[in-house]
Amino acid sequence: MTTLAPPPAPTTQDGRHRAAPPAARSRMRALFTGPPEDPRWARPALWAILVLATALYAWNMSSISGNTFYDAAVYSGTKSWKAFFFGALDSGSFITVDKPPFALWVMGLSARVLGYGTWQLMLPMVALGTGSVALLYRMVKRDFGATAATVAALALTLTPITVAITRDTNPDPVLVFLMLLGAAALMKAVRTGRLMPLVWSGVAIGFAFNTKMMQAYVVLPAFFLVYLWATPLNLGRRIRNLAVGTVALVVSSAWWMVVVDLVPASSRPYIGGSTDNTVWDLVIGYNGFGRIFGASSSVGSQGNGASFGGEAGLYRLFNSIMGGQISWLIPFALVALIGGLVLRGRAPRTDAKRAALLLWGGWFVLHYLTFALAEGTFHPYYVTAMAPGIAALAGIGGVMLYRAFREGSAAVGVPPRERVRAWGRAWVLPAAIAGSTVWAVVLLQRVSGSGTPYTVAEVVAGVAGAVAVIGLLLGRFTGRQRLTGIAALAAVVALLAGPAAYAASAAGSSTNGTNPTAGPSTGGMGGGGGMGGGQRPSGSGGPGGGTGTSNSAPSGSSSSSSQSTGQSASGRTGGGMGDTQVSSAMISYLKKNQDGATWLVAVATDQTASSIILESGEPVISMGGWSGSDNAMTLAKLKSLVKSGKLHYIVVSDSGQGSSNSEISTWVKKNGTAVSAYSGLYRLD
């Protein structure tokens, strides 16, 4: 019997292999067209949304002015691995920023590989922002289909505050992506009952903790509830698995904190924002309970939430400052959550759809209560963390309510009680659309004089909302299903017209800085892209006029001479040891006379120091941290630095507050030599 050899792989005349076989081409095609069971429009729509998200987040990326506080820390991390690990503001590692360093690591690795500059810092933020949209789409699609996922992804993409903060170098885009990773792993654990996805969920939230500390834990009650309720295991195994997942969460959260606090204080930078130079104090104080309960001696937080987001209270997220940033879909999301839970009321305990509703509903409600009632420092951009919950509920609830509407409209031939119940459900969708449209018009009315885009959005929202409600009602009474489909599309337009106008405004702004917001200014130190963050490089070179670097202040931001005043972003003075202006001429003088010192100069606050670091490329000491009230610099430490030749110059003024600041100021003026050309500058030898 003769055995035939398999035919050789097809080749071209020059001996090269031909194109990929049909199976490989089919997989490549599926990447763009989606699986065969999906609607033909689904995958192209997803790609279009991802392109839109990338465009909004990355438009004119090289000119974006981010938060110089974090930019300076990233730059310092490219010059020193010690500064990189600790998240130090300066490459000399005198003091850290007031957050854990994971987001700085993400940007810092990009800058180390690609060079330091604006687009190098922004690239990972844009990628993670777009990745969050894709991840939300995947999670919603698994349980509720392509339509719900498309609406959710589009809603997240167009959330105004999400566009604003993703075009910035604050850590929030990293936080949101990690929280979504944790949610995706959790839902896999819920569906399969397997332990490892739950462990990975804990690890993801742990890394989120090392991005913004306690804010990452806001979603944990919802995570625990969903797992305990919906996982297809007996109660004992659920509790055991949850305990293991909690251990993974604790380890991945605490490892950096434990390592840092075990390092002797003399061998590491001061922990910025803490009251006792420990990360633990930062966790429970400034970045923990201090954010919720406001300023107190026990938690060391600065309670000035009203300066940025308005007074604490249940209405906060609807006020003139916050409303245009996040509240557009909140009414619809709330109705969708309640309606969805009612519709799944008789489902089994392990029902995946109800579990997803509980997850996203808990995500939304927990964040809403936290941000609305927080009495400590509160920036509008914090609420980007609740955007995935709102967007998911909008997509999921919209589809569920639409199906309930169609079933209620066709409720004939069923028992009277069921018919009445179905028809009652049919009214929920038109009412939700009508209420949300009215709220959108109210929000746009608040800024009606701020430009044509908002006026156009107001008209579009009002007309599309009316078309949606009337079309749904006509479709119900006439039985024309196509009419209800057109009305549903009009509803999407009505609910997203306002957010789209705000999102476009944020995408067109190159100045974000320390308090980025979208849309026109509405008070609260937000609006119009937020406050400028001072100078920052825009090319591939480093600070100080390196190749490809621009040191001109961006439009809408302050130059070094005006930004470096020792004032915090809230308009308060730095508190202490030097709110005298630091001009470019002074920086040039300091560099010329640095005389081998480690630090170029010591100044009062992080804001002042970060601007000088970015302009000079040299380490600068921030003696008082972000607010000027940190006890990072003592007189004994200052004397030691001067004696060892590590510091020659310091900026002080007569506005010092607090005994240690006053003591330092008095000693400097007595023992230092005033540089007459620059007010407040002293030479110490």
Image: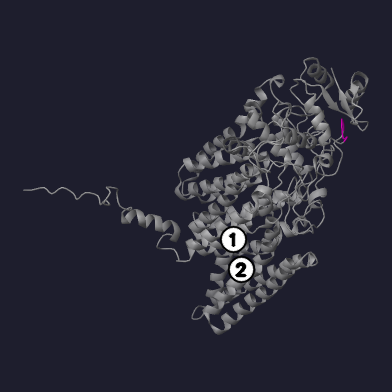
Name which residue type carries label 1: Leu
Is 187 above or below relative to 480?
above
Magenta stretch holds residue 577: yes
Per the image, label 1 sits on a secondary structure element best described as: helix
Magenta region, residue range: 576-580
Residue 185 appears anywhere in the view: yes
Q: Which mark is residue 492?
A: 2
Locate residue 482, reporting x and y percent. 52, 78
Dividing the picture into quadrants, the one containing residue 542 is top right
Helix, strand or loop for the magenta stretch, by majority: loop
Q: Is residue 470 magenta?
A: no
Figure check: 503 above or below 665: below
* 494 w.r.t. 480: above or below: above
The total number of labels drawn is 2
- Left or right? Give the position of 34 relative to 107: left
Q: Name the residue type under label 2.
A: Val
Task: Give the CA separation, mark 2 to mark 1.
Answer: 10 Å
Residue 170 position in % (x across, y down) = 68, 43
Is 137 located above or below residue 410 in the figure? above
Mark 1: few, some, or many residues within 10 Å (few <14, many ≥20)? Answer: many
* Quadrant of the rendering where the C terminus is positioned: top right
Marks 2 and 1 in Cβ contact (< 8 Å): yes
Residue 234 placement (x, y as % from top left): 47, 46
**Quarter of the figure with residue 423:** bottom right
Q: Which residue is mark 1?
A: 154
Q: Residue furthest left?
A: 1
Q: Position of residue 585 (x, y in %)?
A: 83, 34
What residue appears at the point 78 percent right and 56 percent down from the top-left corner? 321
Instruction: Look at the numbered disc 2 and give the secondary structure of its residue.
Output: helix
- Residue 196's tag is none
- Taking the spot 71% from the left edge, 42% from the top edge, the residue there is 550
